[in-house]
């Protein structure tokens, strides 16, 4: 129960990596603020956590809307652990990328993360402690056709991690990134499962990840076991980048 008495806010936690992370943080004693657009899935996630003996509540948010992001920060209140997990990943070849799709990717993957963190971190600074875990992607280290804009958003996330680690480190706030490889989340299974499985096969471990395997890395970086880790990008991709 390393996070007993703490509040953890996990964006995009009604499915996939976010849901797995929310359940693990709750198992470690945190009260978890579950977020997403779908109230029914939010209720399911909260029920799962409570069935396991944990505590959770759901706050609906549309991360493409900066006003909704501000409402989320207000509803969450003081937070000890912030996991910026939510993201979208529609791919398009550069020559076919439309401005609206480009803007939405940056709005959800970068702008929302930036302004949510800016709203949450003052309370952490006041306490002199806090952990922020951003979720990126190992695509930042690969050349993937069609992934130009998505990769750019995740590169921005990793740059923000390094900057914030320096900005907030003197106040006891740690900021790190988890960079997953191919992961068989519900969304991936429904859309790009074949691609994820192919990417997994060419990794050192020869398979794609389960969401909980990525969530365990989030759990570590959020925990007191990582008190001297900040500004790091922890690549959890089964060795895909080294092959």
Image: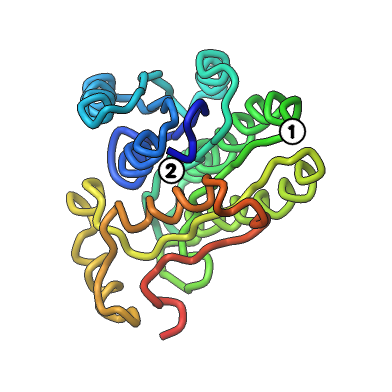
Please state which of residues 199 and 121 is positioned toward the viewer in this rendering. 121
| Residue at image coords 28%, 39% | 15
| Quadrant of the snapshot with the C terminus | bottom left
Please state which of residues 216 and 29 is positioned toward the viewer in this rendering. 29
Element on which disc 1 rests: loop
Q: Image height check: is 49 above or below 193?
A: above
Q: Residues within 10 Å of mark 1 (few under 14, many from 20)?
A: some
* Residue 50: % across, % down: 26, 24
Q: Is residue 95 toward the left or the right of residue 160 in the image?
A: left
* Residue 27: % across, % down: 34, 37
Q: Residues within 10 Å of mark 2 (few under 14, many from 20)?
A: many
Residue 52, quarter of the rendered image: top left
Q: Which residue is label 1 attached to?
A: 128
Earlier sequence position, callout 1 versus callout 2? 2
| Residue at image coords 53%, 51% | 221
| Residue at image coords 70%, 55% | 162
| Quadrant of the snapshot with the N terminus | top left
| Most distant residue in the bottom direction | 243
Element on which disc 2 rests: loop
Q: CA distance from mark 1 to mark 2?
A: 29 Å
Q: Is residue 200 toward the left or the right of residue 133 in the image?
A: left
Q: Which mark is residue 87?
A: 2
């Amino acid at each position: 129960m390393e996070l007993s008495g703490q509040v953890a806010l996990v964006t995009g936690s009604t499915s996939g990596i976010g849901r797995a992370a929310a359940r693990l943080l709750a198992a470690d004693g945190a009260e978890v603020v579950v977020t997403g657009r779908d109230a029914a899935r939010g209720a399911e996630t909260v029920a799962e956590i409570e069935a396991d003996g944990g505590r959770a509540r759901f706050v609906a948010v549309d991360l493409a809307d900066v006003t909704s992001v501000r409402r989320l920060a207000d509803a969450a209140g003081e937070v000890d652990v912030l996991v910026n997990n939510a993201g979208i990943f529609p791919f398009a070849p550069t020559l076919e990328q439309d401005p609206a799709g480009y803007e939405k990717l940056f709005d959800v993957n970068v702008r929302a993360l930036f302004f949510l963190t800016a709203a949450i971190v003052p309370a952490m600074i006041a306490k002199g402690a806090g952990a922020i875990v951003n979720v990126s992607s190992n695509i930042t280290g690969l050349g993937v056709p069609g992934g130009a804009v998505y990769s750019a958003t995740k590169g921005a996330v990793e740059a923000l991690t390094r900057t914030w680690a320096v900005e907030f480190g003197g106040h006891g706030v740690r900021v790190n990134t988890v960079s997953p490889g191919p992961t068989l989340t519900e969304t991936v299974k429904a859309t790009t499962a074949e691609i994820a499985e192919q990417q997994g096969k060419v990794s050192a471990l020869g398979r794609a990840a389960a969401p909980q395997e990525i969530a365990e890395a989030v759990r570590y970086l959020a925990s007191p076991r990582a008190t001297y880790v900040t500004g790091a990008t922890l690549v959890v991709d089964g060795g895909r980048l080294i092959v």
